[in-house]
Amino acid sequence: MTYDVSFMTQDGLAALRVDCARMVPHWVLPRAPWEVEPRVTVVGAAGIHGVVVPDSSARLVDSLAGFDD
């Protein structure tokens, strides 16, 4: 598909650029799913229940306790 733009002058293109620049703040781009930060809900230890951690994983996490400083 082609468009005939021969009627546009340099002044017309300049005016179009100015109009577009003025409208930029009104344009909102939707974010892609990977750009949206997930909502984080902080709960206390009492709110965490029903979580089962294998012994080997618990030992691994326990051995990394020195890295939280």
Image: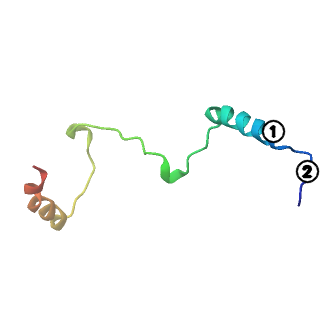
Q: Which percent across, then down, holds residue 64?
A: 12, 60
Q: Residue sitting at 56 percent across and 46 percent down?
A: 31
Q: Position of residue 46 (x, y in %)?
A: 21, 38
First reached walking from the N terminus: tag 1 or tag 2: 2
Residue 67: mark: none
Residue 30 placement, left or right of 38: right
Q: Which residue is mark 1?
A: 11
Given residues 30 and 47, the one toward you in this image is 30
Quadrant of residue 39 within the rendered picture = top left
In-front residue for pair 35/8:
8
Q: Is residue 60 above or below residue 32?
A: below
Q: Residue at x 9, y 62 (%)?
A: 63
Quick check: 62 left or right of 36? left
Q: Residues within 10 Å of mark 2 (few under 14, many from 20)?
A: few
Q: Name the foreground residue: 32 vs 8.
A: 8
Q: Which residue is mark 2?
A: 6
Which residue type carries mark 2?
Answer: Ser
Cα separation between marks 1 and 2:
13 Å
Place of residue 54 in the rendered image (x, y in percent of width and height, measured from the top left): 20, 64
Q: Which SS class for mark 1? A: helix
In this view of the protein, which residue sits in the foreground, 47 or 65?
Answer: 65
Instruction: Say which element carries label 2.
Output: loop
Vertical arrangement, residue 39 with respect to residue 67, above or below: above
The answer to whether residue 27 is left or right of residue 49 is right
Q: Amino acid at mark 1?
A: Asp
